[in-house]
Amino acid sequence: MVNGHFVAVTIDAVQSGALLETTGLTAGDAFSELGDLLLDGLSSGQGTSEPSSTTAGSLRDHASAPT
């Protein structure tokens, strides 16, 4: 199951610009990454485990990168 709260908070963060400022992503890139995470979660059938794709790693890398 995909966590709907996570998706809503992430969309809000992209739209407000908060996620963009901390990651350096464009809105298009952020939504593309979110879409990849959602597809990975849905295709794994678990949705509650850590996504195994490199997409999840790239979001973490951006979030921890200094601005």
Image (spheres, rainbow, N blue to C red):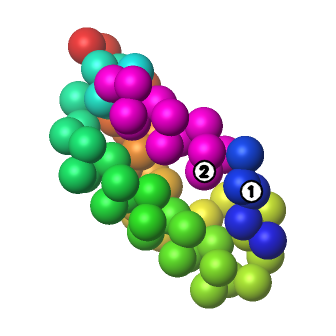
Say which mark, if any, is on residue 7.
2
Q: Is residue 34 above or below residue 61?
A: below
Q: Residue at x 60, y 64 (%)?
A: 51
| Amino acid of disc 2 | Val
Query: Which element is circle 2 on?
Result: helix
Where is residue 61, by image quadrant? top left
Work out whether residue 22 can be spotted: yes
Circles 1, 2 touching at the beta carbon (< 8 Å): yes
Neighbour tally class for label 1: few under 14, some 14-19, many 20 plus, Cα within 10 Å? few
Q: Position of residue 27 (x, y in %)?
A: 26, 43
Q: Which residue extends farthest top?
A: 67
| Count of marks, rendered view | 2
Q: Which residues are magenta?
A: 6-17
Q: Which residue is mark 1?
A: 3
Q: Residue at x 74, y 56 (%)?
A: 3
Work out whether residue 52 can be spotted: no
Q: Main secondary structure of the magenta part?
A: helix
Instruction: Point out the image quarter for the C terminus.
Output: top left
Q: Is residue 27 above or below residue 48?
A: above
Q: Does 6 sit left or right of 54 as displayed?
A: right
